Amino acid sequence: MTSITLSVPEISCDHCKNSIEGAVGELTGVDKVEVAIDTRTVDVSFDSPTDVAAVVAAIEGQGYEVAAS
Amino acid sequence: MSENVVFDVEGMTCASCALRIERVLNKQESVASAVVNFAGQEARAEITNPDDLPRVQAAIEKLGYVIRPLEDGERISIVERYAEETRRQLRNVVGAGLLTVPLMLLSMLGPESRGWGIIQMLLTIPVVFVFGAQFHVIAAKRLRGGDVTMDTLVSIGTLAAFFYSLWALFADEAVFFETAGVIVTLILLGRFFEARAKGRASDAVSALLKLAATQARRLRNGVEEIIDPLELAPGQTVVVLPGEKVPVDGVISAGQSSIDEGMLTGESKPVDRAPGDRVFGATVNLHGRLEIEVTHVGTNTALAQIARMVEDAQASKAPIQKLADRVAGVFVPVVMLISVAVFTGWMIANGEVSESLRNAVAVLIIACPCALGLATPTAIMVGSGRGAELGVLFKNAAVFERTHELTTVVFDKTGTLTRGAMTLSDISTTEDEDQFLQLVGSVEAASSHPIGKAVALGAEEHDVELLPVADLRAVPGHGVVGTVHDVEVVVGKPKLMADIGLIASDAQIDALTELEGEGKTAFLAGWDGEVRGVLGVADTVRASSASTIAGLQAKGIKTVMLTGDNARTAQSIADEIGLDTVIADVLPEQKAAEIERLRSAGEIVGFVGDGINDAPALATADLGIAIGTGTDVAVESADIVLMSGNPALVGTAMHVASATYRTIRQNLFWAFGYNVAAIPLAAAGLLNPMIAAGAMAFSSVSVVTNSLRLRRLS
């Protein structure tokens, strides 16, 4: 199980939270995804076949940009 | 074949929604370019393959928005949108009211029997479930996302009242259908006020848009035809007769006139315009027939851009509103717990379901932070609308809070504290004066710097013919070099002379120092290894500069002037105006760094610039205030735009912002005060749900009324 925290500076409201949690949660192997609006971050726990690239792609597919960290 | 499509977008809740949709649209293969306007709730896209439209729509709908292409001319303006929302809420409140009035009369005066109770129930059902349906729908939607809002509270309160009464009706106990009805009606009334206040605040936008011309005379093959300005395209030519409005933005191709640009700039004095000059839609041609080549139409005109800025400011959310939302998010669950505790407490104390439920419902209703939701938006919309009327555009809502926090205001000298229109005041030369002016004036005329213009104008006044210049090279902050008749002429500061190798005499340096001591901008000019003359230009201080500075100082704000002039010139002007600090000898590219230096010293800095080379400084400052007509690119970097160069508008901006901020805080107090004070009353059973609903609506009304007071701000 891998856990990462991604920074997505454009998160600003519940709408953003729901979209990202929905898109990332659909990926096979994702155990837990939580968006924190205050800190504008996404916490994800996942197993294979999902990897970081897939999570980033899912977030970007929703029209957000993941900040380099 | 590509096609421009305008979409109506539903479901955008914040500015970042617009950004997401824009990004996803631009990723689509068949979309060449797309722009999403949050305030207008619309998207514009250039689609290369119109057959692909359904797929593009599906991609956006997957993000959770409803998107629909608009037919030509179907575009719904934000003004109409508000008007429609107002009409919808009016229908709801009137419908609910018409049923609630007889409901109240029946409950107060009617005989107590099951038959009459059933009539009350029949009157209540449409009120709660049709006119008040929006509360339940929104509450359910939010609840799915784990969100509890004031709609939840209203929904639970009214449903509790309704279903309790339904049970009471058949248990032969006292019903309070009228409570549910009155709550829905009064809250709908609050929503109607909110919609109307929004609509009213957006009057500033519709007032701006009404300035636009309604017809244009298009010139085609020597024939004039009268058409709708929307049909014009860039490149076409229009004729504007004396007394007519310029229909769109363009460049004069023939004719001369004075133009009243007051509606855009706030400047009452007409300006002279000749072929090659830019003119703007909605300005008035005072005399003389003009032929204008169209450059910008529709939403690209200066007028439309200003209107859009007002819209954007009205739609963006202030951080303080998010605070209010956050508070509501905590408040609601706490209130629900209190309600449960009250019910439990009363059940333990006297065991009567009717009374316990009645008091629990009273708590739910009185706590509804309805006015809390009105507190910030109404104040901001009325405040920015009033600001626009006074000549100040606030580009986003966060500005109101930041303006209030400013500790230092930095002014760019040229064009803000001074007129920026300089005149040539002194020449001393070892050459023939006319010949000297001819060479210097020619080089300066070719540069676009305000000092250059002053020298060129001075040369023209001496009836000197200006010559063509080759190899023009501007050294920003230092001067200009150009070749006239094979002579390399250098005009600028002593450092530039030294760099190029021109030698100045002691007398020339003394003359320069003397001019600077008089507050003038002095510089040298020369060629062939020698400095051959000294020139001085003077700028005039704007009439309202000193009083503006004094006004800021009275508020405890430090005033700073930033200028490329040398320290002596700058100090002389600063003394005249009464500034606290002068930072002189600043090159354009150093302005932003100076602002940053002040910020890192702990100051909250506002920067007032005329928007020609100030864009980086405007963006760096905590609050960028641009002086411009709203067409300059640099205006985009600013937070506040002043519609004329009058520095007194800086004071106006501060005044409007602090009044708006104060109103927001008062509103939050009102909203909280009513609710918090009434909760113990409700819990103690001293409040029935009807009084609770009345008090709550009253708090909404007082918040909205308090905001509307900003309209009278002067």
Image: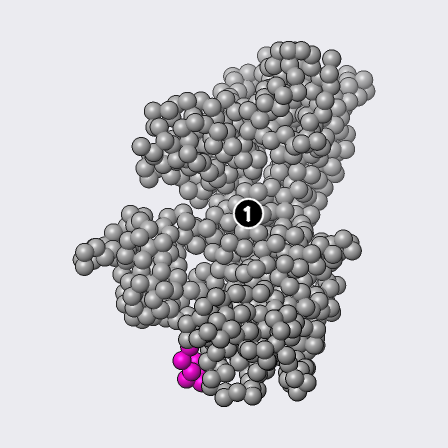
Judged left or right of residue B677, residue B174 is: left
How is the rendered protein coloured? one colour
Position of the C terminus of chain A by quadrant:
top right
Q: Residue at x 47, y 63 (%)?
A: B265
Q: Residue at x 57, y 35 (%)?
A: B16
10 Å crowding of disc 1: few (<14), some (14-19), many (20+): many
Place residue B460 in its image quadrant: bottom left
In the image, the segment drawn in magenta is B460-466
Left or right for B110, reference B358: left
Q: Which residue is mark 1?
A: B313
Residue B367 shows in the view: no
x 74%, y 33%: residue:
B679
Residue B78 is inside the magenta segment: no
Numbered disc 1: what chain?
B
The majority secondary structure of the magenta stretch comes to loop
Q: Secondary structure at mark 1?
A: helix
Q: Is residue B350 above or below residue B200?
A: above
Residue B300 in picture, x, y percent from top left: 41, 49
Q: Is residue B164 above or below residue B593?
A: above
Residue nearest the viewer, comparing B449 with B109:
B449
In which image quadrant can residue B170 be found?
Answer: top right
What amino acid is at disc 1? Ala
Please tell me whether residue B498 is drawn above or below residue B661 in the rendered image: below
In x, y percent, where is residue B328? 68, 33
Q: Nearer the viewer, residue B695 or A7?
A: A7
Quick one: B585 or B692, which is closer to the camera? B585
| Image quarter in which the N terminus of chain A is found | top right
Give the percent coordinates (x, y) of residue B227: 25, 51
Name the residue located 54 percent from the left edge and 32 percent from the top edge. Answer: B20
Q: Is residue B461 magenta?
A: yes
